[in-house]
Image: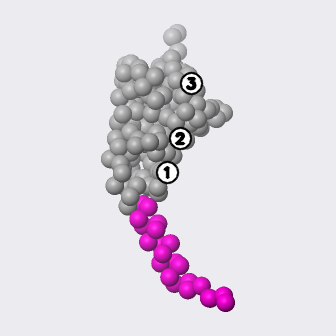
Amino acid sequence: MNRPIDVPIVVLSLLAWLALSVATAQDAGPGDLMALPALWEARYNEGDLDGLAALYTEAATLMPPDAPEAHGRDAVRAHTQGYLDAGAARAEISSLMDYGVLGDEAWGAGTYRFFSDAGDPVAVGKFLIVYRRVGDAWSIARHIWNRDVAPSAPPSAN
């Protein structure tokens, strides 16, 4: 005999599962998640490319402005070295202005500014990162950023 499905009970059960999943994920480390932008900034400013790449998953995807996607920690190192070589000597990364967590996936959004050795801004923009929990730690799985304003050209040496 087929029994009719009690829709309200099914919906309430799914909502309870979802709330428990979110609460469990948040109890398991959003503090670590919230600390990642400052850790990224510190490793960038120290020139610690290996340490910075270690914040990403093995197969992380970078989605930089005006460039094709890049994948993996070697791409993180190479792209970061490219920023340093182009004169972005120091980074300021905001704390996450908005974020969400669901199970072993999370996202965070914020802003960034890069400065030359002389302290002049060379890039200003915003980012969106998808995080994945790997073991007990959050890692960056996808990283996309966009510039607010194109950096100005350096003065010509006439």
**Residue receiving disc 3:** 74
Q: Amino acid at mark 3?
A: Asp
Label 2: which secondary element = strand
Mark 2 and mark 1 in contact? Answer it, CB < 8 Å. yes
Specify the quadrant of the image occupied by residue 27.
bottom left
Determine if the magenta segment contains residue 13.
yes
| Residue 105 tag number | 1
Residue plotted at (47% across, 72% down): 15
Residue plotted at (59% across, 85% down): 5
Specify the quadrant of the image occupied by residue 118.
top left
| Residue 144 tag number | none
Closer to us: 132 or 157: 132
Mark 1 and mark 3 in contact? Answer it, CB < 8 Å. no
Q: Main secondary structure of the magenta part?
A: helix
Closer to us: 101 or 103: 103
Q: In the rendered image of this protein, does residue 22 appear above or below residue 96?
A: below
Tell me which segment is drawn in magenta.
Answer: 1-22
Q: Amino acid at mark 2?
A: Ala
Residue plotted at (35% across, 43% down): 32
Closer to us: 17 or 66: 17
- Whole-percent x and y of residue 101? 44, 55
Q: Amino acid at mark 1?
A: Glu
Q: Is residue 25 visible?
A: yes
